[in-house]
Amino acid sequence: MKKTLLRTLTLLSLSMPVLAQVTDDFCSFGITAALPQPAAGIAAVRHAENIYAIGGYGYFMNAVPIASNLIRIYNTQTNSWSVSSYKLNTPRMYLAALGRPDGKIIIAGGISQEYQGINTVELFDPAAVSTDQAGSNLCQILGNMSCARKNPVLNLLKDGRILITGNTREADIIEQDKSGKFIIRPVKNKMNHARHEHAAVRLADGRVLLITGRQKSMEIFDPHLETFTLTKTVFDNYYDDQATALLHNGKVLIVGGQNTRSSGCTNQTWLYDPEKDKLTPNHTLVPFSNDGVCQGMSDVQVVDLYGGVPEISGRVFLLCGGEDDNGKKDAILRSAWLYLTHTNEFLEVGPMNQPHDDFKAVAFSDNTQLRALIIDGHSANDKITGCVEIFKCQSGIQH
């Protein structure tokens, strides 16, 4: 289904203001090549023209979860998949991955085949990648975190270090010594609260905001002092599985989440202003599944469609998928919106071709088109089908 958008977005470039117009053009979701060995609970990272879908799990005989050690490669120029000869040392689902400025990818934590938390960290170098199925290589093991982490969160700090949080009050830092060797060590101070399935985002000043995670609270990590400070503002309920993004104006968008006390999901969005330490309820959305309108949403993917261009990032976001979990049966969502920061508007651009939950969305826009890859996950009735979609929206940028 296509939606016509009549909006003009004012962005900034290095040299002068530019106009990115989304006018009388169509936004759409189209099916592309299926994911090799379909999976949910993957991690995904873009580097150059490729998007890497890492780990996850599929079902054996449509019943038994099988953790994966595969690294799948989507070429955005040819719209095709291949499988790297490099594999994870440990098959893992619900893991985290983050691309470093040098293109290398850090892979951390997750859940093993035995459904235990994983404490190891691996490094995958796309520059060494091969799609020759005759070869077989393993990623480099960097070491162990201070604890096993299911669904960890990684945040790249401004100085190149990586903050790892999740599951306990202990957090870890990945850094390099003078020789370039990677070191994993505990952060000097503990978090105020243990956070499970939380959200986190690096703020404009370089600090990191940690959001709920079966808590009502938020706290801010100072990378220089390595301290965690609770914000004065808190949420109205205990949430997890929220989504977040940093906006170009320095505020933070927070979307949905599951109330861990009532098991219901919320359709609320919020804006957090770190300068004022103020959390403000924003618009409520109307998510929907194959069966119709849902009351709430969690596990939504929020993607900065200009995230690869720092000068104009934080202006336009795609929100899509997730679930409405009432504690009994999940409704997998097909809904999608564009969020425009400068007008604080949510524009409905769904539905997607299939519902997606426990999936990943990765932007790969250019100067003429907003684009994002929607990678598999659970579809209706919790099936894993291998469905991959491309979101496209014309955006004629005038320099």
Image: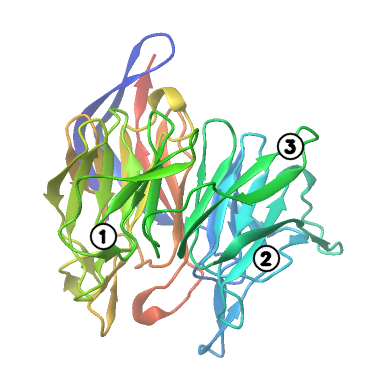
Residue neighbourhood size for the residue with mark 2, other residues' Cα within 10 Å, grouped as few (<14), some (14–19), many (≥20): many
Would residue 76 be seen by someone viewing this image from the given angle? no
Q: Is residue 73 above or below residue 343?
A: below
How far apart are the two marked residues, 1 and 2, measured between alpha carbons?
Answer: 29 Å
Q: Nearer the viewer, mark 2 or mark 3?
A: 3
Q: Residues within 10 Å of mark 3 (few under 14, many from 20)?
A: few
**Relative to 165, 350 lies left or right:** left
Question: Could you tell me the amino acid type at mark 2?
Answer: Leu
Quarter location, residue 22? top left
Circle 1 — which element? loop
Where the C terminus falls, by quadrant?
top left
| Residue 50 falls in image quadrant | top right
Q: Which residue is mark 1?
A: 335
Q: Is residue 211 above or below residue 150?
A: above
In the rendered image, the residue lying farthest to the right is 134
Check disc 2 and report its element: helix, strand or loop: loop
Residue 379 percent coordinates (x, y) = 39, 73
**Residue type marked 1:** Ser
- Report the residue marked by disc 2: 70
- C-alpha gap between disc 2 and disc 3: 30 Å
Give the label, 1 or 2, closer to the camera.
Answer: 2
Is residue 384 placed above or below 79 in the rendered structure? Answer: below
Q: Position of residue 180 (x, y in %)?
A: 77, 36
| Image height of 251 relative to 237, above or below | above
Residue 268: x %, y % from top left: 16, 56
Task: Give the residue at mark 3.
Answer: 177
Q: Are marks 2 and 3 in contact (CB under 8 Å)?
A: no
Q: Residue at horizontal 31%, vertical 34%?
A: 247
Which is more N-terminal, label 1 or label 3?
A: 3
Query: Are the residues flagged by discs 3 and 1 in contact, CB closer than 8 Å?
Result: no
